[in-house]
Structure formats: structure tokens, C-alpha cells
Amino acid sequence: MTRPVFIGLDMGASRTKVVAIDDQGTLLGHAVKKSGIDFAATAAICLDDALAGAGAGRSDIAAAMATGYGRSNVAFVTSRSKTEISCHARGCFHSFPEALTIIDIGGQDNKIIKLDAAGRRQGFKMNRKCAAGTGAFLEEMSARLDIPLEEMNNLARRATEMIKIGSYCTVFSATEVLESIRHGKPVADIIKGIFYSMIQRVLEMDSLTEKVVLCGGVVAHNPYLVEMTEEMIGRPVLLPEYPQLTGAIGAALFAREEAGKR
Amino acid sequence: MAQEKQPQRKKIESTGRMMKIMSEYFYDLNAAAESPDRKVAWCTSVGPAELLRAMGFAVHFPENHAAMLGATRMATELIPEANTIGYSPDICSYLTADIGAHLKGISPLARAYPGIEAPPRPDVLVYNTNQCRDVQDWFSWYAREFNVPCIGITSPKNFTDVSEILVDDVSRQIEALIPTLEEVSGQPLDMARLRETVALSRECTELWRQVLETAMAVPAPLTFFDGTIHMGPAVVLRGTRQAVDYYRQLLAELQQRIADGSGAVDDELYRIYWEGMPVWGRLRQHSELFARLNVSVLVSTYCSSWIFPDFDPEEPIRSMARAYLGLFIVRSDTYKEQYIKQMLEKFHIDGIIYHDAKTCPCNSNSRYGMPQRLERETGIPSLVISGDLNDLRCVSDEQTVTNVEAFIEQLEERKDHA
């Protein structure tokens, strides 16, 4: 073994994220791909890409841990998997070592995780069995409006007004959106309303403590959501350097710790 | 790849005996329904079963039947049948599953007990709304269907103390049931027999309490999931000798487990209190999930709800009123929180899991801030999982697993930091 690397894999319902870190916790390489239907194959491709980015090979892996929805479908891990709740917490605390409320907006679910100043988890909430406030909600709205997901952020930013969406339900929200289109409302204003609704659904899940971190793929690709959240809660939000990778980074950090114990 | 540990579920040897007495109970009910000389009463699970038994009725408990529909995973297919005749998917899924089964003409009893086709036809339906209003609506539907009387007790609700005024109220309501029951049964109430039945109910629930309290031992010799199965006789055979004899045997087996240091879950690491209904269609999966994590879900409000220390043969009707009013579900949050706090201490609990059952608001105690208040007061962490007792359309297995695993990881962190 030339240079030991520690692997974290976050196999989400929507995207698979893999990171390689060194023994100091520094990010050496990473990869993100659609999870698709063959989780094991996607994980293997992401692993090789992340290792290539790190200038390492499979023989350099000192330890690896999986997290996320497909955490049981991964072949190359060395540690027992942990949930994405623990891994996001670990990844965010690594960037911001203080008492935190972490908001993770994922493709399929949202989480609010509270940590004390020592990084110890105080509690967590996941969204109920409902797409409100998740990336899936945004995907549905993108399809209804026939606007690519990646264009939504810039359109929302250009809005002059905001069309508020009143419903919890994704299907009812889509009906509201169609009604706004029928009334000739500007698309940018509708998208801003969709973004607002997403954040509102997440903020309803739990109270927030002073320091709030946002993470997850939806935030990574829609930075306007961060600005909106800051406006809505009336204070700045902390954003990790790689918001989409916090779960994978957390898993890699856990893998490193467990390797240290062996 | 790191291998997941296979769950170890320990079989309770007395189960065979329980199956036998439950089988005898169902065959007797079926025989009663077919006999011109016997009468059948349907009763809610914390309704006046003592009175009905003392008056010679064979007693059927639709909640037991509905739980069987859930446990056999038949319920989810049947609920829509009731939805189509106007019973919302948002109301009690015991009610909708049971009425749906009747409409479709199917029953888990027919699968389990050859010769039985359906629950016994009632001659009278008797409810107590101490659990919820849905039981009254449920029984009223059958009263129209079978054209038989539906009578009951409209219980006071949300009180902290069981005052004598409330006991007066419910006692009078129980007494008011007697003339109709005498008319249906064709015989007068025999007070000596009622005293004897109340005495047997008291003995049964006292033994059931001792069975559940064996879980105070570390490791716990039985789990909540075992309890949901073994509570059968406490629900449907309360007031009979068979139930009393059965719990003596079960208690002896569990005491032996304690003496042997044998836990229901291998290498018990954490002890959990379950608040709310079981997810009947997921009993095995949930039992295995916790066993795999070395977690013992060992005590619950639900199973403990069939402990009635107030039954007193010297004062049968008044003590029945007191027992039915003492039920957890009918009390205020102030009482419920005191009760749970005392249970947390008694059973050395590390965490609480609240099951927020979509169609059972009265058994979902996470909706008015209780988890937050109890966590603040006791420091014991809690988790709320969304699901349902019978309607598996409201259950997300993946979300349940992730929530539970994340919660146990949180308990591990607490232990590591301590």
C-alpha cells in the first residue's frame, strides 16, 4: 500500500456519491452519478472515478463505509454501514465543529439533524412519507413546466414576484402550478413560489437552533435556495464546500475512525 | 463486505398452549352462533365483557378479528371495500378492514380454523367509547347489517384522575345495559356469577401484569412483539379460567428465562419503550429489525392496557366502571406522561419509539408535543415513526428501517460520549 485512502459512499435514491479522503480528512477525489437501477455497478464506477481523482487505486483503500438508501447494496465496504443521518451529521460537523442544525434536502427525503457543541446528536427528523420539500417535488414541477431542472435556479432568481403554492401535496401543487400557467403568470414567478414552498415544507419539520447548515444535492445545484432560506429564517446559513458530498465525507470519516480502532 | 448479523428470535414454548386455547375459544364462538340455545355478543376490547360473560353470552371481539386481518396482511386489500361505501381511508383501519372483510365474505378465521367461515353472527353489540368514537360507528354498521341492538357506554375522556363522579356516570351506564342484555339473553343477571367473572378478570390481568413485568429483568425475557401475540387471552378470554391457567404457565416460563439469564434478544444493548399500536402486518420484520440491532423493545403502553387492578368482586359494577375509566387511552396527557415516566424508570429504558398510526389518532400520542415534553423532562431520546396498525399503504418500510437504525446510532453515540 503506497498511500492509504478512506472511502465514503453515499448511495442515495437519486444520486450516488463517492469520496476518497486521506488520513488527515482531506478530500482527494470524488464522483457523483445517477444511482440508476444497478446500484452495485454505479457504486463501482463512482469508486473508480473517485480513486482516479485521488491518484489512487483500489489497493490503496484502507477502509470504506457505505451510507444512504442503497447502503446494503455495495460490495467493497469494509465497515458496517451507517445511516445517512449519522453520516451527514459527521460530514457537516467536520466542516463546522460547533452546535448545529443540519438541513439535508435530498432527492427522496429531507432530514433535520441537531448536534450539540461536541458533535453529539440531539435528535433528528425525517420527512413523513411524502415528497413535499424534496428533490422529487422539484423534479415533478420541472416536468410539469417542461423546464430542465438545471435552469430552474436561474429562472427563480429572475422572478419579480412570487406565486405562492398553498398545498402540501405534490399532485395538488402541480395543479396549482398549471392554474397559474393558465392565468398567464410568469414562469419565473411560479418557480420562485415552488422554491419557497420546498423550503417552507422543510422548515415546518422542526425548530432551528442558532447555526444552520444546508446540504444535499438539491442545495448544491440550486444555490438560490440557500439565499431564500437565509431570508426566510432571518440569518446566514452555513454551506459546506461540497454540499452534495457531506454524507459520503461523513462515511469516509467514520471509516477512517474505525480503521484507527482496528 | 461486512456481513449483517442474522436476527435471533427466541420462541416462547408456551405458544402452543396459547394457540390451543385460542382455537378452543374460536370454535366455541362458532358453536354458540350455530346453537339455538346460546347467544353471541360482540364487545369492544375494553367494553363490559365481564357483564356479557356473566350473562352467558359467547363474546366476540371485532378488534381481535381486525388485528388478525392486519397480522395476516389481508387488511390492506379489504380496506378499500369499506372506503367505497363511504368509510374514509382516514378513519380506523380496524373498522374499515373488518367491514371490508364482511363485505367480501372472507376472514382469517376460515384460514386458521377449518370449519369456521366467518365471525359469529351477533345477537347484540356492546361498545365502550373509552377507546375512540370509531368503535361505536363500527358496531352501529353491523347493527344495521344484522338488525340487532347496539348498546354501549359513552365514556368520559381526557381526564387526569378517575373521580367518583366519573365512576358514578359509567356505573349507571353499565347498569342501563342490563335490561336489554337480559331481554336478548333471556335470563336475569346473576350477581354471584358476575362477581366470579370479575374475580377471574382481576386474576387474569394481575397475571398478565406479572408476565409483562418480567421484562424489567436485564436482559428482558420477552419483547413487545411477543406481548402483542401473547396478550390474546387477556383480550378475548378475560374473565375465564383458561386465561388464568395460561398466564400461570407463561409466567413460569419467563421466570425460568430470567433465572437462566436468557434474553429474548441476543446480547441486549439497548432497551426501548414502544408507545402506540403495533404495525400488525410488520410484526415479524420489526421484531427481526430490532433483534439484528441487539435492541430489545420490551415494554409498551399498548400491551399494558389490559392490566386492570381496579376489578373488585366485592363491588363488581363499580369496579368495572373504575377499570374501564382507568385505561391509558382515555386519560389526559398529564396522566399519560406521568405513567410513561414511571414506566421508563421501572424498565430501565434507553429510548422511546412513538408509532404515529395514520388512522388511529387516539393511540398516536406524538401529535400534541408529548415526545418533546417527555424528552425534556427525562433526557431519554425519542423517535416518531409514521405508519399504521392495519393499512400498509401508510407504511414505508425503508423509512422505518432508516429511522430506527439512525435512532440506535444516536443511542450508541450517547453511550460512547458517556
Image (spheres, rainbow, N blue to C red):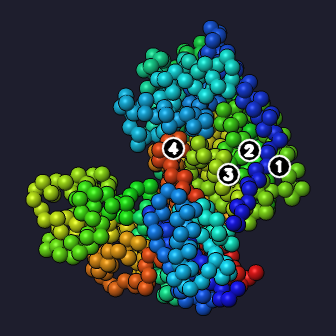
Q: In this view, does A7 lie above or below B92?
A: below
C-alpha distance separating marks 2 and 3: 21 Å
Chain letter, disc 4 residue: B
Question: Which-is-in-front pick, marks 4 and 2?
Answer: 4
Instruction: Between residue B333 and residue A112, name the one nearer to us.
Output: A112
Quickly name the residue at label 2.
Answer: B208
Among the two numbered marks 2 and 3 on one chain, the one whose residue lies closer to the N terminus: 2
Mark 3 burial class by Cα count in 10 Å: few <14, some 14-19, many 20+ = many
Mark 4 burial class by Cα count in 10 Å: few <14, some 14-19, many 20+ = many
Quickly name the residue at label 3.
Answer: B287
User: Looking at the image, do the residues carrying marks 3 and 1 touch, with CB atoms under 8 Å apart?
Assistant: no
C-alpha distance separating marks 4 and 2: 29 Å
Q: Who's the residue at 66% across and 46% down the image?
A: B284
Q: Who's the residue at 54% across and 15% down the image?
A: B183
Q: Who's the residue at 41% across and 81% down the image?
A: A212
Quickly name the residue at label 1.
Answer: B254
Q: Tell me the amino acid under the disc marked 3.
A: Ser
